[in-house]
Amino acid sequence: MNFAVLLKAFDAALMFGDAVRRLKKGDAPPPAEAADTRLASLGSEAAGTQLEARLTNVIVAALKEAFDRDHARLELERAEMEEQRRRADEARRLERRRQAIEGELARMRLLVGAALVGWIVAVLLVAGRLDDASSALRVTAAGGWLLLIGASGAAFIAQRHVSAGLFDGRPMGTRWAGTALALFVGGLALSTLTLLL
């Protein structure tokens, strides 16, 4: 842009110099010819200015379009990265929940196994003594057996609730897990008490 202005200024200076020389020599062009020359130069300058303005508008529009396209592409990439981050966070959260549920299920399975083994051991310990056992021994043994079997049942129900919580988002800790543990401890206590009777 500045170069074009410089060229126009140089061209105007040359034309001015030519006009001064002609006036000094006395051979100035006839007024009609001078007017035509001025009109032609003005017309070419106006056409050049219009062409320059059009080219400037085209370049500005192309740059604006390129910037808009880059902005849209950056916004799309930012949205994709945000979506990927959200998916990764959700996957991590689900993985932590799955691991916690697996741990709780393993604990419930261990409780079921321990309750069944405790029941079998309690039956074997008391089975040989039932013929001459007192009624207190029989009631205590039966109570211990029932509590151990109840602990197994409650642990099975807790397993079902915990595994269902993986899919529907319910909280993992159910009252059945606490009930199963309480019944197991009570059953072991009564079974131990039968050894003392």
Image (tube, rainbow, N blue to C red):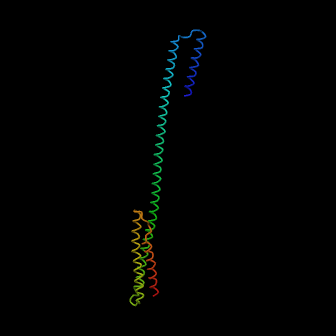
Q: Position of residue 104 (x, y in %)?
A: 45, 68
Q: Quadrant of the N terminus?
A: top right
Residue 37: x and y in percent read: 51, 15
- Horizontal side, residue 164 vs residue 53: left or right: left
Q: Is residue 25 left or right of residue 176?
A: right
Q: In the rendered image of this protein, does residue 118 appear above or below residue 138?
A: above
Q: Quadrant of residue 142?
A: bottom left
**Quarter where residue 26 is shown:** top right
**In the current view of this chain or complex, which residue is farthest to the front?**
31
* Location of residue 135 with respect to 184 vertically, above or below: below
The percent coordinates of residue 125 (x first, y second) are: 42, 84
| Location of residue 118 in the rendering, given as x and y in whole percent from the top left corner | 43, 78
Query: What residue do we see at 45% from left, 62% from top?
Result: 97
Looking at the image, the residue that sits furthest to the right is 24
Q: Which residue: 48% across, 47% down?
A: 78
Query: How many numbered tags mark residues here?
Result: 0
Q: Quadrant of residue 183?
A: bottom left
Location of residue 15 with respect to 50 vertically, above or below: above
